[in-house]
Image (cartoon, coloured by chain):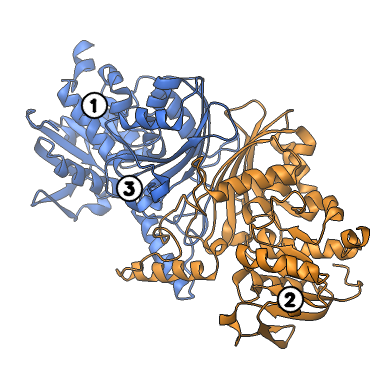
Chain colours: A blue, B orange
Amino acid sequence: MDNQHQPVTVAILGATGRVGQELLKVLEQRNFPIKELRLLASARSKDTTIMFKGKSFGVQEPCAEAFKGVDIVLASAGNDQSAEFAPIAVQQGAVVIDNSNAFRMDPNVPLVVPEVNGHVLKNHRGIIANPNCSTSQLVPVLKPLHDAAGLKRVIISTYQSVSGAGKEAMEELELQTRAIMNDKEHKPVVFQKQIAFNLIPHIDKFLENGYTKEEMKMVDETRKILELPNLAITATCVRVPVMVSHSESVTVDLERPLSPQQAREVLAASPIVEVWDEPERGHYPTPIDAANEDPVYVGRLRADTSSETGLNMWIVADNLRIGAALNAVRIAEYLLQHNLLHPAVASK
Amino acid sequence: MDNQHQPVTVAILGATGRVGQELLKVLEQRNFPIKELRLLASARSKDTTIMFKGKSFGVQEPCAEAFKGVDIVLASAGNDQSAEFAPIAVQQGAVVIDNSNAFRMDPNVPLVVPEVNGHVLKNHRGIIANPNCSTSQLVPVLKPLHDAAGLKRVIISTYQSVSGAGKEAMEELELQTRAIMNDKEHKPVVFQKQIAFNLIPHIDKFLENGYTKEEMKMVDETRKILELPNLAITATCVRVPVMVSHSESVTVDLERPLSPQQAREVLAASPIVEVWDEPERGHYPTPIDAANEDPVYVGRLRADTSSETGLNMWIVADNLRIGAALNAVRIAEYLLQHNLLHPAVASK
């Protein structure tokens, strides 16, 4: 970013988690203007020290005192921690960019991918929600297609990496894979079933309508971000034995015809989408291509054989970056660039 | 099967391959009435011996002579071998049940999953095609739904195991996984890209319309088997780091409403489909559940949030069995039970 902005005080809630670590990496890579950095995590992490820009930082427990003087809280410590501490941090004058599910569907909380709907940030009242990872990489693709030809229906099947379930989940995939390679057993703890060399069509809890919460997050959050409350959309979410990056097989029906080539051009114009779509030379994105990278990659664009105005595509992105840390930091950058740190407090 | 039938002479073309081995296992498990067994494979396998029902069998190279006196050829040696030897075997008086892609779309060749369209077997002229693995497990689910409520549109995303690409592909996943766990490299040979801890949205060759051949096989073969030449259907086929069993996330639009519970009942009535769909107790199929099993498993049945008469579901089956060997042997059993070994020859 343009780091000419006056440096600000940043707190990271959940600093020792997988997304917390990615947040620190992204802040450093983007040279985010930090005056003071506070790393917050639960009691069991209290003896941890963490390096940032060559300096060592201790970790403290979150409490009202810890948020005093903080400008921006980047929260990634789960629903309960966010529900408890976000309001406290806001009371202390901070803006909270929250990666949990606690506030996403709250009508008073903007749910934002800045390149898609940054304009709603001006309405924030202290808490801003970061979408779920599988939604974050979908909406930057859907939005330009909607603007070009009108979205009529969206059907998604996901292939989600284990890092979406945290550090322990990544360890479980690794240890379970090693065990199986050595004809040993490694019982599932984080996941409901074996994940090594297997697939689990079950992410988050089951709901009454037979969908999982993860699936309904994609439905509800996409509708909210695109401001299309009645969009016909459905999702099937599946965990796959991949470490990092989520992939999505997506079918869209459009109001007006749009050729695959027109779709490629529309998508290539996005600042955060990269089109990798030259099948004749085997050029399409896979999870390992997207890991540690910023763009949302799109490939396999083609006219749907089942619909006159349909398109099929394959979307891959690093779920820890665009799906979490990178999007959170981009929201923070947007707030600084547009002087939106405390607008609602000021306007009350 | 009812093994009261007069024993027949069976040849297996491609006996040393992954499907060839599975064919032997299925023939033995089902106590198929074999008078004489001939194992055929390319020259490089000529010193191999293979055990069947406790006896050791040598492997011979295929040639006209080798098919003399053979009643049924189970062919699984790839397109080129099938294209070359199937007509030769038919000339020698055999019926060829072919697992390759060589004859599937030939209008004179029945393409069969016996429980779905066994009636077309009476029209065979010596060659009968076994559908592609991803189609074989789809049509037993689509057919009862079509009979109950009329199929309007089908959208499929697959999660296909490496065994679909043969023994070498399974070895590549294993060796590459070991290498990565030890921070070493193992370059892709069978696959286009790394498959361990990765996904490859590319199975078989790319075609001019941007689809892969694998995807168009699902489209064309499903239309042929269901006798719905204009069915609106599309597929995205993805290779996943799973050893055995293909999974499919499927959305269907129906002509008439069908509730998830009605769909479960309709599917449960099929002799080869098993409904595993009690999400409240975490009961849904995964690849390791289906491996080495006969049924096509269906779970995650739910009303589509994107369509009034849509259903979403998750289909899993052993691609080597229902997707290849088991279906081939079931075709052979059907031929014996209905005295269809030589009908076309007789009626000519």
The percent position of residue A124, horizontal first and vertical second, equals 28, 20
Q: Position of residue A281 (x, y in %)?
A: 39, 50
Horizontal placement of B325 versus B126: left or right?
A: left
Could you tell me the amino acid type at mark 3?
Ala
Marks 2, 1: nearer the viewer? 2
Q: Residue placed at 51% from the left, 20% from the top?
A: A255
Which chain does the residue under circle 1 lie in? A
As helix, strand or loop, the secondary structure at mark 1 comes to helix
| Residue depicted at 85% across the width and 51% down the height | B119
Near mark 3 (Cα within 10 A), the count class, few <14, some 14-19 or many ≥20, is many
Q: CA distance from mark 2 to mark 3?
A: 52 Å
| Residue position for label 3 | A290
Compare residues B80 and A201 and report the one nearer the observer. B80
Residue sitting at the far top: A347
Q: Nearer the viewer, residue B283 or A286?
A: A286
Question: Where A115 falls versus B320 (above or below)?
Answer: above
**Which-is-in-front pick, marks 2 and 3?**
2
Q: In screen coordinates, is A239 left or right of B93?
A: left
> Could you say where residue B240 lies in the image, as x and y percent from the top left?
48, 56
Residue placed at 76% from the left, 59% from the top? B128
Label 2: few (<14), some (14–19) or many (≥20) C-alpha neighbours in 10 Å: some
Residue A90 point in image, percent of width and height:
23, 26
The quarter of the picture where the C terminus of chain A appears is top left
Q: Which residue is mark 1?
A: A90
Name the residue tied to disc 2. B64
Mark 3 vs mark 1: tell me if same chain.
yes
**Amino acid type, label 2:** Ala
Q: Give the structural element (helix, strand or loop) at label 2.
A: helix
Number of the front mark, 3 or 1 = 3
